[in-house]
Image: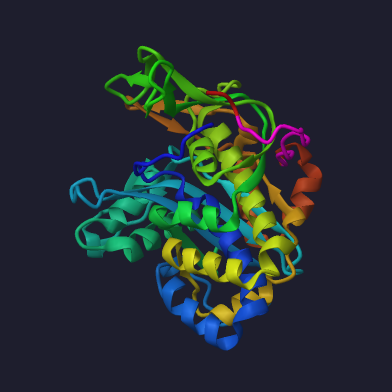
């Protein structure tokens, strides 16, 4: 039997639960909370500001909605390193409020980052995951990091404005998944963990691979067997889900960050399904435990709209209407410029982002159905995940 991980993982892929958490608020808050519960958790979860010139100015979300979802690697013990956005997803809800589209932006995407005078950044061309850092530095903190990232994505998308945004605190991630009772997910390619394994002689858990100076896994350590996630559908424990969506180096299809993005999006959908399932929303004790975990995990920048309005607006979104999209059709488009490797968004990916801005995503996807990422796998009987 696999052991639960006892040590803290690096801060990666924080984004993966955000929208599941918001959908949980939609169903759970209305069920057992009333205004008292809503106000209690609103104080823990919501923040103002954070979007700068990329913020939608209206006080309602009656029309289409765009959200910026961000997972950051926050180096709290290393001020010089600051914080970078490891995961960036743009979420779009059409004016009909009956569907949700998710598009990841690769962290190495080459972009033009606006200036941030308050944090002494003059603007320039860089990888998009540096935008959060340039806003975060010199005392800017999370709010200014999110602001500069939102303005960068807005420029990339032809002036898209965001109604809200979210950042996830990794420390609350495992607690939320555990409170939900795990999630059911389908593995679409064999994934070998570079972070979790066991010693075949002693049974002790440990990191199974050696790494080079660039952080790339090389050889297996003596007697170590890595955790393997085989193709199929399984019930994931919290630690398994965290480990699975973290992987990008040893994927069977060699699709790296694109594979990880796809798995993160699939996980968001799995979280949303579990969060809105009868086993959760009809159990007041479970709802309270989950909402308590959400309060520790999610920082939601609500714009000019109250949390109650967000909940009311999102309440009818069916997780089955969550559509995950393939940036660059899931294929690497890398270029080396002045000795640095960048990922380049092709014109179709840029046009997809602009369709978010224009609320024309459904029409765009009718003409580009190959950009829709199919859900992985079909259910299998085995309840276990991978091998030891």
Q: Give the magenta part as a residue range.
A: 372-385
Q: Nearer the viewer, residue 14 or 107?
A: 14
Q: Quadrant of residue 137?
A: bottom left
Image position of 300 with respect to 199: above or below: below
Query: Residue 166 location, x and y as percent?
Result: 48, 62
- From the top left corner, tell me how far across and down residue 311 is, in percent: 63, 75
Residue 16 lies in the magenta-colored region: no
Residue name at image x 42 percent, y 39 percent: 5
Residue extending farthest to the right is 366
Q: Is residue 164 left or right of residue 102?
A: left
Q: Give coordinates of residue 92: x percent, y percent.
A: 64, 59
Q: Return the residue nearer the eye: 3 or 190.
A: 3
Residue in the foreground of this view, choosing between 251 and 108: 251
Question: In this view of the protein, can residue 334 be seen by the observer?
Answer: yes
In this rendering, position of residue 31 left or right of residue 56: right
Compared to 218, does 81 lie above or below?
Answer: below
User: What residue is rendered at 50% in x and 84% in y?
Assistant: 39
On screen, residue 199 above or below 299? above
In percent of width and height, residue 6 lies at 37, 41
Q: Quadrant of the N terminus?
A: top right
Q: Taken as a whole, is the magenta stretch helix, strand or loop? A: loop
């Amino acid at each position: 039997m696999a052991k639960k991980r006892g040590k803290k993982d690096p801060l990666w892929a924080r984004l993966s639960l955000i929208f599941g958490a918001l959908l949980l608020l939609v169903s759970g808050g209305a069920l057992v909370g009333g205004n008292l519960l809503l106000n209690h958790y609103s104080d823990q979860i919501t923040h103002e500001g954070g979007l700068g010139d990329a913020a939608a100015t209206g006080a309602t979300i009656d029309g289409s909605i765009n959200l910026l979802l961000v997972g950051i690697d926050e180096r709290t013990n290393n001020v010089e390193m600051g914080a970078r956005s490891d995961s960036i997803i743009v979420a779009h809800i059409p004016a009909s409020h009956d569907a949700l589209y998710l598009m990841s932006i690769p962290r190495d995407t080459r972009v033009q980052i606006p200036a941030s005078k308050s944090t002494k950044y003059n603007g320039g061309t860089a990888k998009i995951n540096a935008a959060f850092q340039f806003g975060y530095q010199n005392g800017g903190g999370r709010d200014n990091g999110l602001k500069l990232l939102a303005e960068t994505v807005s420029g990339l998308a032809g002036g898209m404005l965001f109604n809200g945004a979210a950042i996830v605190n990794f420390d609350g991630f495992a607690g939320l998944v555990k409170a939900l009772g795990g999630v059911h997910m389908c593995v679409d390619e064999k994934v070998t963990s570079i972070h979790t394994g066991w010693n075949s002689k002693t049974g002790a858990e440990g990191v199974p691979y050696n790494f080079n100076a660039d952080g790339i896994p090389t050889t297996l350590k003596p007697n170590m067997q890595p955790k393997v996630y085989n193709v199929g559908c399984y019930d994931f424990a919290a630690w398994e889900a965290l480990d699975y969506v973290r992987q990008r180096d040893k994927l069977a299809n060699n699709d790296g960050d694109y594979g990880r993005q796809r798995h993160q999006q699939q996980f968001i959908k799995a979280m949303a399904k579990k969060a809105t399932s009868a086993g959760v929303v009809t159990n007041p004790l479970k709802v309270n435990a989950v909402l308590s975990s959400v309060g520790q995990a999610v920082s939601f920048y609500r714009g000019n709209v109250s949390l109650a309005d967000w909940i009311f607006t999102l309440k009818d979104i069916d997780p089955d209407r969550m559509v995950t999209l393939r940036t660059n059709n899931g294929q690497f488009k890398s270029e080396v410029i002045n000795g640095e490797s960048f990922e380049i968004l092709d014109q179709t990916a840029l046009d997809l982002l602009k369709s978010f801005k224009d609320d024309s995503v459904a029409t765009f996807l009718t003409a580009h159905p190959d950009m829709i990422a199919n859900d992985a796998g079909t259910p299998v009987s085995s309840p276990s995940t991978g091998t030891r």
